[in-house]
Amino acid sequence: MPEISPLTMFDATVVSTLAGKIWRHHYAEIISPDQIDYMLAQRYCPLLIKSQASSEAIWWQKMTLDENIIGFSCYMRTDASDALKIDKLYIDIDHQHKGYGALFIANAMDTMHKNSCNSLILTVNKQNSTAIAAYKKYGFEIIGDSIVDIGGGYFMNDHLMSMTKLCK
């Protein structure tokens, strides 16, 4: 069974490489290769991951199986509310569809409760039907849209989703 633990500074390069593998596979039919490269550089630079992993307001987690990192997630408090946002949640393509995402959701809920947040939110690309279905299965519902200019001529066109059943 996989194990979830906090990301360390030494894991940043592995996570950056894993993000590239997952994104290039998963998003190839959703966004352009140029946008994938742009977003990977913007969000998964090892120096950025190390900086965020040392922050007390951002929680990077890794999932390991047989001592190998097979997934990662990142949660953060939102500025505008007392919500915890799942900013990243990815499982290696060789380990998907095994229920491992549910482990990260449970971990995020635990982090939410420990930090006195009242809701769990996330954004997901409107064309990412696989992830949308999974999040709905875990109890999230679409509550709005999020269209964000991320620079470089690119936009994120996402659904805003929120957990509908929060159990302590």
Image (cartoon, rainbow, N blue to C red):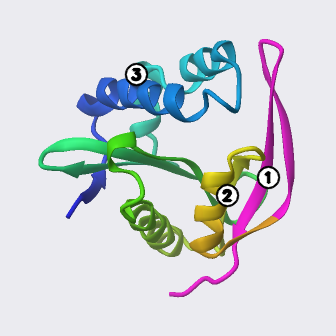
Task: Name the secondary structure under disc 3.
Answer: helix
What amino acid type is highlighted by mark number 3? Pro
Residue designated by label 1: 159
Q: Which of marks 3 and 2 is in front?
A: 2
What amino acid type is highlighted by mark number 1? His
Q: Is residue 103 magenta?
A: no
Q: How crowded is mark 1: few (under 14 residues within 10 Å), some or many (20 or more)?
A: many
Task: Name the secondary structure under disc 2.
Answer: helix
Q: Is residue 65 visible?
A: yes
Q: Can residue 77 be seen in this view?
A: no
Position of residue 56 measured from the top left corner of the image (x, y, whole percent): 46, 48
Q: Nearer the viewer, mark 1 or mark 3?
A: 1
Using the image, determine if residue 116 lies above or below residue 97.
below
| Nearer-the-camera pick, 58 or 95 | 95
Residue designated by label 3: 46
Q: Which residue is drawn at 79% across and 52% down?
A: 159
Q: Residues within 10 Å of mark 3 (few under 14, many from 20)?
A: some
Q: Give the range drawn in magenta.
A: 143-168
- What separation in Å lies between label 1 and label 2 (alpha carbons)? 9 Å
Query: Which mark identifies residue 151?
Result: none
